Image (cartoon, rainbow, N blue to C red):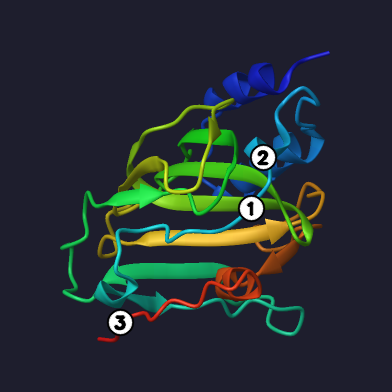
Amino acid sequence: MATILDRLNAHRRIVNSDHGDHMAAIDGIIADYVAPPTVAADSLHATSYTLPVASPASQWYIAQGHTFSSANSGGHTGLDINLITGGDTDLGQPVYSTCNGLVVYAQQAPGAYWGNIVVVQTIGVRGIEFWRYAHLNRIDVQVGDYIFASDSVGTIGKGGCNRYWAHLHLDLWTGKIQTPTAYRNRGGGWMDPLTAWGAAGHVWEWGTR
């Protein structure tokens, strides 16, 4: 039986311009993954959350929030985080893991949209969580790494198409993920990262622009 690393390596060879199919491939791999039971519990538990960007939060603003729901299936699935100075001023800024966890995906995505992606699996108050850091300029981790909150996962980039100003796209889904039929149609539950942070007592004062 192929291991997750075998499957991820095989996926690296896929050339696919449709990021919906790409995400289906990612999710099919992650859905089947079970973390090794020998790992220390704290390494896979979100015991607390930290900012995914450099402090203070007031120098950043949420350019686009989480709007996805069952009633709005075309909504934005995560947060777009930018420096309040705008433009590409945050290009190359460090991106930090918001929690302890296991890196289950770390590579450049096929197609023109996502650019470099890192996905970190953890165990939160609602069970298994997957945090996705997208549009990265550089990746600092690899699949199989156990990382802690505030560890660097990469740097802010412009995605694969250079169509947008540099920013971090961060989203979160929970539960066992089923292979989707389309980009936003997942078996897992999308959650607003702000809600997850708030439930853990982290309410940061973001900037405005």
Q: Give the foreground label among 3 and 2.
A: 2
Q: Give the foreground label among 1 and 3.
A: 1
In this rendering, would 143 be left or right of 55? right
Cβ atoms under marks 3 and 2 closer than 8 Å? no
Query: Which amino acid lies under the numbered mark 3 shown in the image of this protein?
Result: Gly
Of 183 and 79, nearer the camera is: 79
* Identity of the residue drawn at 70% across and 78% down: 69
Q: Which residue is mark 2?
A: 42
In this rendering, would 52 be left or right of 4? left
SS at circle 1: loop
Q: Earlier in the sequence, mark 3 or mark 2?
A: 2
Q: Which of the 4 image quarters holds residue 72? A: bottom right
SS at circle 2: helix
Q: Which of the 4 image quarters holds residue 75? A: bottom right
Where the C terminus falls, by quadrant? bottom left
In this rendering, would 30 be left or right of 79? right
Q: CA distance from mark 3 to mark 2?
A: 32 Å
Query: Looking at this rendering, what residue extends furthest in the top direction?
Result: 1
* Identity of the residue drawn at 55% across and 48% down: 18
Query: Which amino acid lies under the numbered mark 1 shown in the image of this protein?
Result: Thr
Of 160 and 199, nearer the camera is: 199
- With respect to residue 13, does 191 lie above or below? below
Q: Which residue is mark 1?
A: 47
Cβ atoms under marks 2 and 1 closer than 8 Å? yes
Of 186 and 89, nearer the camera is: 89
Cβ atoms under marks 1 and 3 closer than 8 Å? no
Q: Earlier in the sequence, mark 1 or mark 3?
A: 1
Mark linked to residue 207:
3
